[in-house]
Amino acid sequence: MLEEQEEHAIVDALMARARTAQQEYVAGADQTRFDNAALAVGWALMQPERNESLSKMAVAETGLGKVADKIIKNHRKTLGLLRDIQNIQTHGILEDNPETGLIKIARPVGVVGAVVPSTNPAATPTNNIINALKCGNAIILAPSPKGAGVCAELLRHIHAEFQKLGLPEDLVQMLPIPPSKIKSQRLMESVDLLIVTGSQDNVRRAYRSGTPAIGVGAGNVAVIVDETADLTAAAEKIMASKTFDYATSCSSENAVVVLDEVHDDFLSALDKVGGRLLNAADAAKLKAALFQDGHLNRHMIAREAKQVLEVAGIDLPNAEGCEFLVLPAEGIGADYPESGEKLSVVLSLYRARDFAHAQEVTAKILNHQGAGHSIGIHTNHPSRATELGLSMPICRVIVNQAHCFATGGAFNNGMPFSLSMGCGSWGGNSIDDNLHYKHFMNITKIVREIPAREPTVESIFSDYWQKAGK
């Protein structure tokens, strides 16, 4: 009980400092102040030497991912977000519409709490901090135990940039190391808004905290390759996405559903880009090693293919040039763990008789895990993507793109740059969009009287009465 009181006091002190800093930040503020604060945070991570150092530290501390890819992710995700918000107004009067009589005013939320994962210990907190500051808020981070040191180093760089602008350091804080569930729970209960990326356990805790919370659902991306697809391009894009940062992304492909008509040719295309199909014996070894007592083997997640093979005890005859492993799937559901998220360079393979069957298989995968998140399709039949969007329990259909690059925003598509993807009601989330700045502010409405616009009953019901009668 004494320990709990002490940990609560630590968080309460952080909150008091954050509230003071936030009030100082917004007092006499203008859009330029908010924009410069966001830019300061972006440069704290994007400055090349700092980016490289933090990326190396992230891999060393968490054991997850690839340094070169983290450098790219930190740079592109931050640059893309800053592009998205560059000319966006988040301060003062946003709209004054005489026709509706409404004036809309941007208002800060206050103090944001952000629970961030070990998979992206620099990129995700940076994204959250930029969005929070852009809208006039302070923010306190609750990092994963793995990656807390990276988060602390990131904040050191942010505070150094703040000094150049005369901004209070307490605008951006984190729970002290070591993190604990007691401190994170207190934070969840104390802040004005919660942003939670990472484990579904954290998301559920956030929803139960009594604080308005935005959580994101689990990823388990399935991608359809149909008979009209450019198989070479599809294989190259799947390889690039599947192996990027060794599959730490929730948007990395976990399953591919291939139509029978192109199955053999597509496997040949995958093999050319480093995707090795496992035989039955090696597939059994991989499953036994990767899936243990309902958990993923920590020595295999977010590691290169060579280590995955070594841990599984597989001597692959064509291991030279192997980038990822293709695991023939035996089924879908709790008894078939290969149908779920793997966080590794392992891609499950399903066959489909035709496109209708591919939809059935994909829907079963999503209903097992990953509902609401996203699916992909490689096709030259444009209407099929729309068909998926009309029928599948998902918020995004990614067409002919490397999935992990496209889902969270890319320079060649229209999605907002983000590392947190809302999954709508299908995924148990309150948002169906990529998390972005609009989720970090309130809008006050000034409501003025206008000439009445009351319709007649006849103007509303006339068409209905013609069909159904009165």
Image (tube, helix red, strand yellow):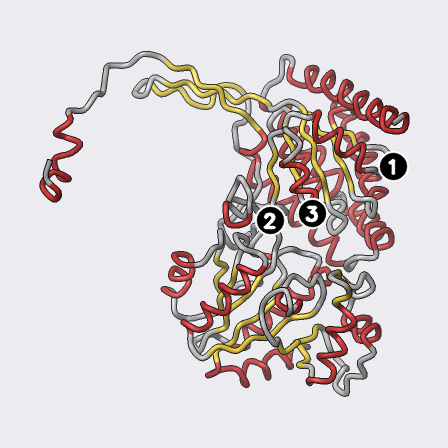
Residue at figure coordinates x 80%, y 26% from the top left: 11
- Of the residues shown, which amino acid type is indicated by label 2? Gly
Up the image or down, 461 lies above or below 279; here it is above
Regarding residue 32, the answer to whether it shows in the image is: no
Q: Which mark is residue 177?
A: 1
Q: Is residue 93 left or right of residue 65?
A: left
Outermost residue toward the right? 2
First in residue order: circle 3 vs circle 1: 1
- Of the residues shown, which amino acid type is indicated by label 1? Ile
Q: Nearer the viewer, residue 285 or 373?
A: 285
- Of the residues shown, which amino acid type is indicated by label 3? Gly
Q: Residues within 10 Å of mark 3 (few under 14, many from 20)?
A: many
Q: Nearer the viewer, residue 214 or 229?
A: 214
Quadrant assignment, res 452: top left
Q: CA distance from mark 2 to mark 1?
A: 27 Å
Q: Which residue is mark 2?
A: 217
Q: Position of residue 142 (x, y in %)?
A: 76, 36
First in residue order: circle 3 vs circle 2: 3
Callout 2 secondary element? loop
Q: Which residue is mark 3?
A: 198
Residue at figure coordinates x 18%, y 24% from the top left: 455
In the picture, the quarter occupied by the N terminus is top right
